[in-house]
Amino acid sequence: MPLLLAPALLFFSNALMHITLFTRLPHIAESAGLNKAELGLALLGMPLGTLLALPIAGALVDRLTPRIAAATMLLANAAIMPLFALSPGFFIPILFATYSFIRTFLDVGQNMVAIGIETASGTSVLSRSHGFWSVGLFAGSLAAGGLIGLGLSPAWHQSAASLTVTLLIAFFLAIAPSNAVLAAPRGRKRPIFAVPDRAVLLVCAMVIGISLTEGTIYDWSMFFLLEIVETDAASAGLVFAAFTIGMGATRMLGDSLRAHLSAATLVRGSACLGAVGVSILLMAENAYVAGLALAILGAGVALNAPIGVMVVSRLPGRSPSDNMAAMSMVMLIATFGVPAGFGFIAETAGLRVVFAILLPFLALSLLLAPVAGRRNASG
């Protein structure tokens, strides 16, 4: 646990901020006067922010060190979080762009902290570190359900989350190892853009269906629970916790699964679980069935990020941070119009159609699973 604690704090804090924002998204959209199509356009700020950050993410994280970069970016997002609940509609896309710009550095930094500890110690911590993302989602979902039930406003809710994260990061800085590991290869001139090579492109093609599924759950599942399943706002936050339980349990077992199963097998299993979860969700008529579907979906998407990160971090020729930034760039380009497109579809055709669209993408991930190779993802 001592080796795991530092990256666990980062992933937990990142997830707590993220879920606090997205469990309140229906309330934020309503107070800002945004319908689903307009919210989808506002969500385009997130890929725009990522696009601006990606060219410099790897270099900046290496320069600051992953420890300082991750802590600084978490504190920056904590500072802007309450503004989502207080801003008019025209400012919401700017906030999403800023949030995502900052979070791009954070994602690279927190993964580099985990991989650095794993490399230096020889102890697998990456999947369990990602497991604490799920723990943060679970804690944030339960808190959201309780605080919404108590009638706490989104602004106060987000302020409380920001204060909590600030305290956790102070603790992280006190315990995290300060040595930088996995630096860029010496003697190589860093490119301005982390251009993906063929190996990175293949990994991205493999994981895209599962990644789209996870993103859609964050963006639209609260709306689905409120409007299709017809739960109240407080119950919706609690039902969403089932997703975090499925994800968290699977990620906590992730290092063991990586040791015994090939990466290709894990990707196939993830895609199949995702398809089963989406199918059940589409048929859900009450909160219990929706909760079961979300738990299965959580298990289905749980290992997507750890497998993708580990595979690209061990590709030769560039620093792991550059390879991760390159993967992020490809995923950004591939999914750039998805928030706006899904928002338009949700407004015009309904939320069931949005989730049904995920099924062919999950089939694509299933078909491309062999590109992960037959070797163990951790080796």
Image (cartoon, rainbow, N blue to C red):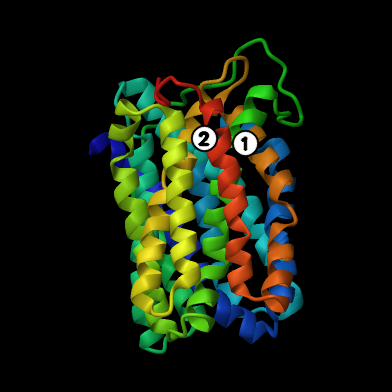
Give the percent coordinates (x, y) of residue 109: 52, 39
Q: Is mark 1 on a helix, strand or loop?
A: helix
Quarter of the image that includes the C terminus? top left
**What amino acid does circle 1 point to?**
Cys
Q: In this view, does 145 lie to the left or right of 156?
A: left
Say which label, 1 or 2, has the lower sequence index: 1
Q: In this view, does 160 lie above or below 203?
A: below
- Is 103 or 34 nearer to us in this picture? 34
Vertical side of 61 occupied by 336: above or below: below
Looking at the rendered structure, the number of numbered marks drawn on it comes to: 2
Percent from the top left, x then y, of residue 71? 48, 47
Q: Which residue matches tag 1?
A: 204
| Quarter location, residue 29 | bottom right
Please determine whether, in this image, residue 193 is positioned above or below residue 143.
Answer: above
Please report contact status of discs 1 and 2: CB closer than 8 Å, yes or no. yes
Q: Which residue is found at the position 47% from the left and 37% from the top?
A: 267
Quickly name the residue at label 2: 308
Amino acid tagged 2: Gly
